[in-house]
Image (tube, helix red, strand yellow):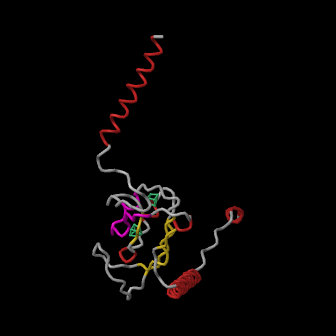
Amino acid sequence: MAGYFKDIWQGITTVIAGMEVTFKHLFEPAITIQYPREIKEMYPRARAMLVNTIDDCECCYKCQRICPIDIFVIKGIRAGKDEDLGMLPTGKPKLMYILEFDIDFSKCLYCGLCVDVCETESLHWESPQEASTFCRQELYKSFADMPEEKKQELLEKEAAKKAARAEAAAAKAAAKPAPKPVPRREDKAGEEGE
Ligand code: SF4
Ligand code: SF4
């Protein structure tokens, strides 16, 4: 019988202890928000989304090389010596055209290694309030903004340059004198026997 009343007493004191915490915060302002009607500001250092300011990118491929899961797709073509592509934030001239610069965020680990190695700081984190999406394809982001015709033009030029280089290398190889034939062992033995 004593145990029965003890249990009731324990139940009452436990409820009072729990409600004490509730009553303490009852008249304080709420810390929850009515998402999605209300959206909270993200912290400025949040690793929410990678963004590449393509004009500041030198196309060095360091981010691609360091990424542990290889999710960058980068394609660049070196500009001609007489072409001026502007300056980089590092003070160096921009030397590469960037045809493609894609990141598949659906695979990203958010480790930040790519941002750490980017010398020009063109690759950086941004904190959009709504980075989530229902569609996986929307997580594949392309940052290069070159028109398709310009890309084709550059690719054709590059292919022509490569072909010219290969032709020059072949011509150089053909112009070299043929190496002297190495005498065979039997020929040498025959000469010694005579
Ligand atoms: S944050 Fe890490 S995983 Fe994501 S793209 Fe950069 S290096 Fe790759
Ligand atoms: S490391 Fe920076 S500069 Fe180099 S390719 Fe990546 S984003 Fe561009």
| Numbered range of the magenta stretch | 112-130
> Is residue 94 positioned above or below 37 on the image?
below
> Is residue 25 positioned above or below 192 on the image?
above
Residue 114: where, in percent of width, then height?
41, 61
**Residue in the foreground of this view, choosing between 156 and 163:** 156
**Residue in the foreground of this view, choosing between 16 and 181:** 16
The residue located at (43%, 58%) in the rendering is: 35
**Residue in the foreground of this view, choosing between 3 and 110:** 3
Give the side of residue 169 with respect to residue 97, left or right: right
Quadrant in which the C terminus appears: bottom right
**Residue at the top extreme of this rendering:** 1
Residue 155: where, in percent of width, then height?
53, 83
The residue located at (35%, 30%) in the rendering is: 17
The residue located at (39%, 58%) in the rendering is: 47
Residue 141: where, in percent of width, then height?
49, 70
Residue 138: where, in percent of width, then height?
53, 68
The residue located at (31%, 42%) in the rendering is: 25
